[in-house]
Amino acid sequence: MSNVDVFLAELNANAKAYSKQVRDTQDQWGDFFYEEAEPLLAMARAALGDSWAKTLVQGYISFVIDVNKSQLIYERDKRYKYARFDEVKDETYKSDSFMEKYHWGVFVTTFAWGHHLRLIQFFQQQFLPCLKADAGKAVDLGAGSGVWHQMFLRHKPNWKVQSVDISPYSVDWAKKMANGVNADGQVSYQLGDALTYSDGNLFDAATSCFLAEHLEDPGQLFINLANNLTTHGYAFVTCALTAAEIDHIYEFKSESEPIHLAQSAGFRVISTLSAAPDRASINSKYLPRSMALVLQKKKGDVW
């Protein structure tokens, strides 16, 4: 059995409703679903061992329940539950039990949610072709489990990546998964703050995926992305709009907001994509969306 089949069987045995949603994504995306899910699951399997499928399923179920609950509260209160990092850190990032489930739940959404697959397709079609084919250096700010820079390296095997994350848990597991697919030599891991990270060198490309909404001042993330890039270097950024989760503290309401932050930081906006879940309710006040931006660092105010 493929890793995908093992995972789906485990999910079906524990949560048939969620299994149907993921199988709907599988049916809709066909080969692309397998192409993206299989290598990600292989990394998780190598890192987690025999309990890999159970760990992923438990994390995904917990994450989806939390997301649904948070969105209902958001609909009721018309604001995110928390607005400051200090309010949420003890309940989330400093809790090992929370991080274990959260980490793997987010990991699964990369391929399980159709609108996230649309972002991956956009990443491959709009961002990667901007980059030179030969060797280069990229930085991944707020790398989490490392899924985005691992997807990057599948298409750019001659590149080197600097992975940066503030969570020791995430850095540790990103390393373990890279070791499992023999990709550790292409990635350097650094425990650090995405808003201030600098090693004195400039990179040819940068990624930062689903970090901005976790920050009190996401504008600083765009500024530091630009600070770490060579002139005319490219960046790929994703963020969540009106999509409540327990640790989302910055409420992006419109697609123009991250665009404005990128332009203010010195980027030219090359292309964007806004993707919503297929199952989003038309009766809801807020439409949860995931947005991706392909950016290029400008030379000056105009170019």
Image (cartoon, rainbow, N blue to C red):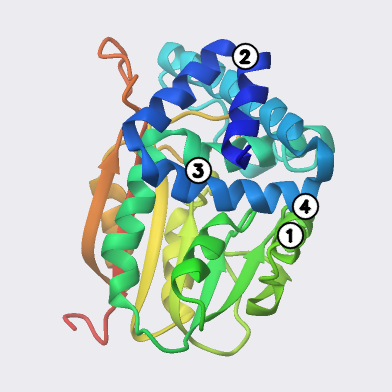
Residue 50 placement, left or right of 209: right
Which mark sits nearer the N-terminus, 3 or 1? 3
**Residue 255 in which image quadrant:** top left
Whether tag 4 and tag 2 are in contact, CB under 8 A, the answer is no
Say if mark 2 contacts mark 1, CB within 8 Å.
no
Residue 46 vs 149, above or below: the answer is: above
Whichever of callouts 2 and 3 sits on the residue coming sooner in the sequence is: 2
Residue for point 42% across, 59% down: 219
Mark 1 or mark 2, which is nearer the start of the sequence?
2
Closer mark to the observer between disc 2 and disc 1: 2
Q: Position of residue 281 (x, y in %)?
A: 31, 14
Amino acid type indicated by mark 1: Val
Q: Residue at x 69, y 30 (%)?
A: 59
Q: Amino acid at mark 2?
A: Ala
Amino acid residing under circle 3: Thr
Q: In this rendering, is residue 192 above or below 303?
A: above
Q: Is residue 151 visible?
A: yes
Q: Which of disc 2 and disc 4 is earlier in sequence? A: 2
